[in-house]
Amino acid sequence: MSGHSKWSNIKHKKEKSDAKKGKIFTKLGREITVIVKNGGPDPESNSKLRDVIAKAKANNMPNDNIERCIKKASGEMGDATYEEITYEGYGPSGVAVIVETLTDNRNRTAGDVRHYFDKFGGNLGQTGCVSFMFDTKGVLIIEDEDGVIDEDTIMMEALEAGAEDITFDEGSYEILTAPENFSSVRDALSEAGYTFASAEIERIPQTTVSLTSEDDITLMNKLIDILEDNDDVQNVYHNWEI
């Protein structure tokens, strides 16, 4: 559940999530909890819940887990309160980093995030210091390593559904949408029979930067890994071109 830079970064994220399914499910559970508390437990009337359910299914989260999280958040199975806090800062050599969290203890989370930045060659900044470098987009990834999807057909269907752009790279289609059109485009393509390797609202860097120093590359990888490994961290976005 991390940064975005075409399919290479999405695949990087997917490989990590495959190795950490339990942690991914915990993070998704928190996200479902917050969305249900804010908008209700019915996905028909709560579009954000519908979106996160689709994301959970794309990450192979079992339906029983999803339903249990919804019941828990709606008060049927206890109570939990989480706060959404976003941190912004710089990694090694000025790489822009955004960290989205859901936490029940803001002091703990702030301390952890600041420590990670300091330890791995970066520094935590003020709100707004790097977010202007990113655009918020709906991102849908459809895998087609076997080449069975007709490119003209999927392009026509995606654009007719309201997508802004569609590209093919390394055996996968990447479809971008405006945030407000994300749900309708995803639903239309799902009804057309497509399945998604990833379906999320993401922050996409307007430009990317390269790291040439092996030390900086090592530090940046460690920073991303330790942030993603923290239970309070939901998403990590950056403008490093991996």
Image (tube, rainbow, N blue to C red):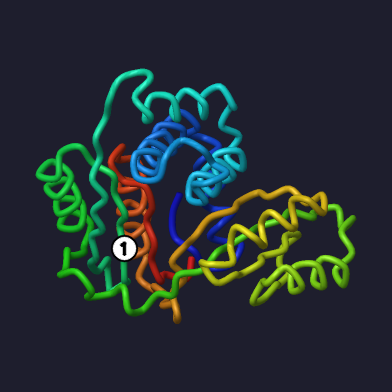
Above/below status of 150 relative to 191: below
Q: Is residue 19 left or right of residue 226?
A: right
Q: Identify which amino acid the numbered label 1 is placed on.
A: Ile
Residue 155, given in percent of the width and then of the height, sits at: 79, 71
Q: Residue at x 57, y 44 (%)?
A: 44
**77 or 220: nearer the eye?**
77
Q: Observer-nearest residue: 104 or 97?
A: 104
Q: Please name whichever residue, 49 or 86, is drawn nearer the observer in this view of the structure.
A: 49
**Can you name the residue that lies furthest to the top here?**
77
In which quarter of the view is residue 236 placed? bottom left
Q: Position of residue 55 (x, y in %)?
A: 55, 45
Residue 66 drawn at (x, y percent) = 51, 29
Residue shown at 22% from the left, 75% from the top: 129
> Which residue is depicted at the point 90% across and 55% down?
148
Image coordinates of residue 211 in percent, x first then y, are 39, 72
Q: Callout 1: 10 Å neighbours few (<14), some, many (20+)?
A: many
The kind of secondary structure element at disc 1 is: strand
- How many marks can you see? 1
Query: In the image, what residue occupies the spot 59% across and 67% down?
Result: 181
233 with respect to 41 (left or right): left
Residue 231 versus residue 146 in the image, above or below: above
Q: Is residue 58 above or below residue 155?
A: above
Q: Quadrant of residue 152?
A: bottom right
Question: Image quadrant of residue 153?
Answer: bottom right
Farthest front residue?
45
Residue named by callout 1: 98
